[in-house]
Image (tube, grey):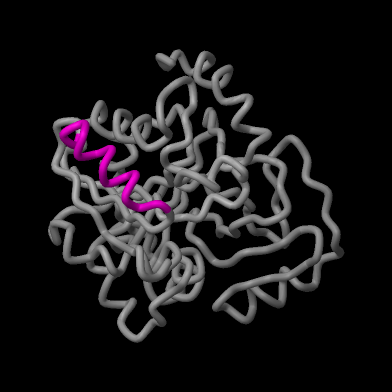
């Protein structure tokens, strides 16, 4: 199994810590974030990893070398000269992956209870809208959850991505005019509740920062600019290639990309029974 760790970000929400180190090297419970993600991937059976680097890239590269890549095949995708965002970073790393295997993508600042092996091996077939038989192949699978936020991914009844909405401002993105019209016709702001929202017949979920990408999707990135977000790519391509959502109801997840959540991370790890 193969995976990519997005570790090239500037980590501006973690200043002043990231004035002297990359976000990936910020310690949580005495261990750098990147090491925690590597251990989680290793324990799930992943043996080939790609890590993209930019901000203080030498610190990450040296740390991996010092630890002999933690016994794994780890390749570096170097973005030192230019930060490419998540979509551009993934495309630049394309030659470093095995072309016959899915790529699990994991943000470096995410802690969770996700069974990464199970998620990696989910059936990628989706329901054909014409015949009702699951035989079409998804281009990507996004791990999603319900949490109170402002921005949500929008899915149809078959958990296929159809758009994005900001429930405070009413801003909508969708390649389907009818979906965009239906969402824009709602009255905003919409107040998020403790239960998942359904708006205009569509299901709203938050993205987790963990997703599965199938290498055949690289062909659809031809012609894109050097720098682009992966979610913008998914929202553009989802009308041509099915993008699945996987809703994990018991998901426990923390984004430790901000100082306030960083202070809570050790307690979160204890709840997950993760060794600090």
Q: Would residue 3 appear left or right of 198 to someone viewing this image?
A: left
Q: Quadrant of residue 225?
A: bottom left
The structure residue drawn at horizontal position 59% and vertical position 31%, both measured from the top left corner, is: 262
**Magenta residues, start to end:** 56-69
Q: Would residue 247 appear left or right of 67 to someone viewing this image?
A: right
Of all residues, the one furthest to the front in this rendering is: 20
Decide whether residue 60 is among the magenta residues: yes
The structure residue drawn at horizontal position 62% and vertical position 48%, both measured from the top left corner, is: 13
Q: Quadrant of residue 265?
A: top right
Decide whether residue 198 is among the magenta residues: no
Question: Closer to the camera, 160 or 272?
Answer: 272
Percent across and percent down for residue 170 are 78, 67
Vertical side of 103 occupied by 110: above or below: above
Looking at the rendered structure, the number of numbered marks drawn on it comes to 0
Question: Closer to the camera, 22 or 173?
Answer: 22
Vertical side of 130 occupied by 161: above or below: above
Q: Would residue 174 appear left or right of 62 to someone viewing this image?
A: right
The structure residue drawn at horizontal position 50% and vertical position 62%, both measured from the top left corner, is: 161
Percent across and percent down for residue 233 are 45, 71
Percent across and percent down for residue 188 are 85, 62
Percent across and percent down for residue 35 are 34, 32
Of all residues, the one furthest to the bottom in this rendering is: 223
Q: Quadrant of the N terminus?
A: top left
The structure residue drawn at horizontal position 48% and vertical position 67%, both measured from the top left corner, is: 229
Q: Would residue 180 appear left or right of 160 to someone viewing this image?
A: right
Q: Main secondary structure of the magenta part?
A: helix
């Amino acid at each position: 199994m193969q995976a990519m760790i997005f570790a090239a970000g500037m980590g501006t929400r973690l200043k002043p810590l990231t004035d002297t180190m990359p976000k990936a090297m910020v310690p949580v419970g005495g261990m750098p974030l990147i090491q925690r993600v590597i251990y989680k991937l290793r324990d799930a059976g992943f043996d080939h990893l790609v890590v993209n680097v930019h901000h203080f890239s030498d610190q990450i590269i040296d740390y991996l070398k010092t630890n002999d890549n933690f016994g794994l095949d780890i390749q570096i995708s170097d973005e030192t000269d230019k930060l490419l965002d998540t979509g551009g970073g993934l495309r630049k790393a394309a030659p470093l992956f095995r072309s016959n295997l899915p790529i699990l993508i994991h943000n470096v600042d995410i802690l969770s209870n996700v069974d990464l092996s199970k998620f990696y091996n989910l059936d990628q077939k989706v329901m054909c809208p014409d015949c009702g038989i699951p035989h079409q192949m998804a281009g990507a699978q996004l791990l999603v959850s319900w949490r109170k936020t402002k921005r949500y991914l929008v899915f149809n009844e078959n958990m296929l991505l159809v758009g994005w909405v900001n429930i405070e401002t009413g801003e909508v993105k969708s390649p389907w005019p009818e979906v965009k019209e239906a969402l824009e016709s709602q009255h905003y702001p919409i107040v998020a509740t403790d239960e998942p929202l359904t708006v205009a017949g569509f299901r709203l979920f938050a993205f987790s920062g963990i997703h599965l990408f199938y290498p055949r999707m690289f062909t659809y990135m031809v012609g894109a600019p050097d720098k682009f977000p992966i979610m913008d790519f998914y929202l553009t391509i989802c009308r041509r290639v099915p993008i699945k959502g996987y809703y994990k109801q018991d998901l426990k997840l923390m984004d430790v990309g901000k100082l306030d959540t960083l202070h809570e991370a050790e307690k979160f790890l204890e709840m997950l029974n993760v060794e600090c």
